[in-house]
Amino acid sequence: MKKKNLIISLLVGITLLFVFVYIYQVSNCLHESYRKQEFEKQKKQLEQKKQALTHELYQAKNRDTITAFAKTLGLQPIRISQVKKLQ
């Protein structure tokens, strides 16, 4: 009788252990799924920021933009007479 109770107790204990392990795995899976969604959202935001910065860089490298900026600063083109020869 004691052996039978021991076996039943072990089976119940092992079953409960498996249930808790399963619950733990499911909760970890959900947690990682949420983290993945956060990372994907962050990746999308960073890609948009990269695209905006790339566009801004190309605008800054544009010759017309540089010329307009130089005119706002009051700069004028350099003439050859202004260049001095180094000896």
Image (tube, grey):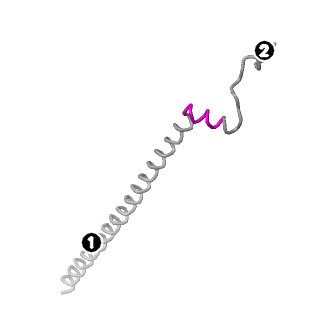
Which residue has dot 2 on it? 85
Task: State which quadrant residue 30 falls in.
Answer: bottom left
Residue 27: mark in rendering: none
Q: Is residue 47 left or right of residue 28?
A: right
Which residue is farthest top? Answer: 87
Q: What residue type is labelled 2?
A: Lys
Secondary-structure class at tag 1: helix
Question: What is the span of residues highlighted in magenta in the rendered image?
Answer: 62-70
**Coordinates of residue 20 in the picture (x, y in percent):** 30, 74
Of residue 26 and residue 56, the one placed in the foreground of this image is 56
| Mark 2, other Cα within 10 Å: few <14 / some 14–19 / many ≥20 | few
**Coordinates of residue 22 in the picture (x, y in percent):** 28, 69
**Coordinates of residue 83 in the picture (x, y in percent):** 76, 19
Which residue is located at x 41 percent, y 52 percent?
44
Query: Mark 1 or mark 2: which comes first in sequence?
Result: 1
Residue 18: mark in rendering: 1
Which residue is located at x 54 percent, y 33 percent?
62
Q: Measured along the vertical axis of the image, is residue 58 above or below residue 2?
A: above
